[in-house]
Image: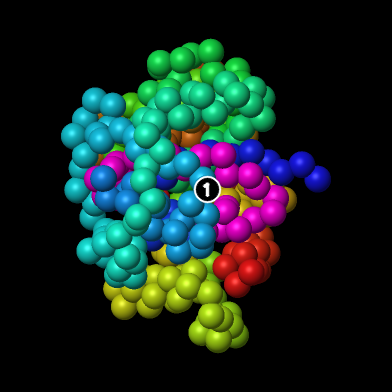
Amino acid sequence: MDKKKIILDCDPGMDDSMAIIMACKSDALEVKAITTVSGNYSVDVTSKNALKVLELIGRTDIPVGKGMPEPMVRKSPKDPFTHGTDGQAENHLPDPATPLCGRHAVELIIDTVKANPGEVYILCTGPMSNVAMAMKKAPEIKSMIAGIYAISGAFGLNRYAYANATGDTPQSEWNVYVDPEAADIVYNSGVKLVALGLDVATHFDVNLTDGDIHMLEQSDKPEAKFFLQAIRFVNQRGFEAYCAVIDCMAVGYAIDPELVTTITGRVGIETKDGLTLGMTVLDSRHHFVWETLPEVEIGESADYEGFLKLLMKLVLA
Ligand code: BDR
Ligand code: CA
């Protein structure tokens, strides 16, 4: 079977780091590039962290392009959560010897899509600033992107959606909250978008068994140790294990779309300051909807057991 070509646009971040590990170790995916953005941390830190993880798993052949230092029109907000002083759950990996690829993330996205028209999926596990900028700079790429799978939004489909809100307004998700204008551009771009929101990506069923923990402890893989430390880190702060692997759901979906059940819905992004900034408003009225809002696929539920099995298999491989 042909491998699915992907660009992983991310802001590592402990769960982005786990997503990098998962994507790079999967036989089903060909990671053409990793592009970094400001989000969980400044783009200097997220770029360094991407290189650190690639060195950890011996995949420094994958180019890393550093991207937008700030959201499109706003200042970077302060994250109400923390991924640790190093942004990687206090794993404190060594400083990378591998250099960045020398191309800006926006250019790398444009060039990679143009070189593989109709074949590249973009996985967004950070704010959408790089992807929106690429669409602004080279609008012709929109028709060449195979699809976008994003950890994005909260749609109120279950009790986790808002209870686990990661943005700094009561019902927003961090990646949209940081750069709502970018999300607005991407959602309205016409590119097929699958938004895996907090409804599915922060489900409490994403938990490891004692057997899983034991297997990680027995493994001599550095990525297994990285994962264990991330779980310890979130547990110590009173969070469930899901927190360490939120972004992995986008990779799981890219590998096996059967893992997530989606619904189609019209969604608007709130770009006005105040109580609702960054909300992804799903128009689910049955009598009539705003047809001007873009139609996207939204994660409704997932096979959490299957997802965890896949994640464990790839970490231990
Ligand atoms: C998102 O917020 C970040 O902290 C995580 O890396 C993830 O991409 C979830 O809302
Ligand atoms: Ca992220």
Q: Is residue 130 above or below residue 311?
A: above
167 and 36: which one is in front?
36
Q: Which residue is mark 1?
A: 61
4 and 197: which one is in front?
4
The residue sitting at 63% across, 26% down in the picture is 116
Q: Position of residue 113 (x, y in %)?
A: 56, 26
Is the CB of the residue bearing disc 1 within 8 angstroms of ligand 2? no
159 and 202: which one is in front?
202
- The magenta-colored residue range is 19-43
Q: Is residue 1 left or right of residue 216?
A: right
Residue 91, quarter of picture: bottom left
Q: Residue furthest right?
A: 1
Q: Is residue 118 left or right of residue 136?
A: right
- The question of residue 22 being in magenta is answered with yes
Image quadrant containing the C terminus: bottom right
The residue sitting at 51% across, 60% down in the picture is 58
**Number of numbered discs overlaid on the protein picture:** 1
**Callout 1: SS:** loop
Q: Is residue 307 left or right of residue 198?
A: right
